[in-house]
Amino acid sequence: MAPAAGRGPRGLWRACNWFMGAFFALAAFVQVNDPDAELWMVVYTIPATLTLLVGLNPLVTGNFIWKSVSAIHIILCGLWAISLAYNLLLHKKQNLLHEEEGR
């Protein structure tokens, strides 16, 4: 018997969100050795929580709080990446690919 229309893609979408949530949670968990682990744990825990919420209820993406947390996280991570790139280019001593941050 064929699956109900829309059930397959919806189930696949939920499974992908659960997988990505587990991936981000694992990434947050393995940061314990990092010198700035607290920062990276927060950076990975927020998307883990957001994707797990989508896995539970895909309609949560319409929620104002979910949208706000997601947008703020994306903006802050983007700004942080820009500042890291600027700092790397400003202080590079040789070819960018020879720097640890450039690899």
Image: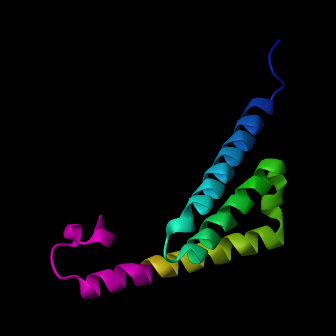
Tell me if residue 97 is in the magenta stretch: yes
User: Residue at horizontal 68%, vertical 59%?
Assistant: 48
**In the rendered view, would you say 29 is above or below 6?**
below
Image-based side of 91 in relation to 67, left or right: left
Image-based side of 97 in relation to 65, left or right: left
* Residue extending furthest toward the front: 33
**In the rendered view, would you say 57 is above or below 39?**
above
- The image quadrant of residue 75 is bottom right
Residue 97 spot, x, y in % from top left: 22, 67
- The image quadrant of residue 27 is bottom right
User: Which sits in the foreground, 31 or 85?
Assistant: 31
Image-based side of 52 in relation to 79, left or right: right
User: Residue at horizontal 33%, vertical 71%?
Assistant: 101
Q: How is the image coloured?
A: rainbow
Q: What range of the chain is rendered magenta? A: 82-103
**In the rendered view, would you say 13 is above or below 51?**
above
User: Residue at horizontal 66%, vertical 78%?
Assistant: 72
Residue 29 spot, x, y in % from top left: 62, 60
User: Residue at horizontal 79%, vertical 56%?
Assistant: 53
Residue 49 spot, x, y in % from top left: 74, 61
Tell me if residue 95 is in the magenta stretch: yes
- The image quadrant of residue 9 is top right
**In the rendered view, would you say 73 is above or below 19?**
below
* Residue extending furthest toward the top: 1
Q: Main secondary structure of the magenta part?
A: helix
* Residue extending furthest toward the left: 94
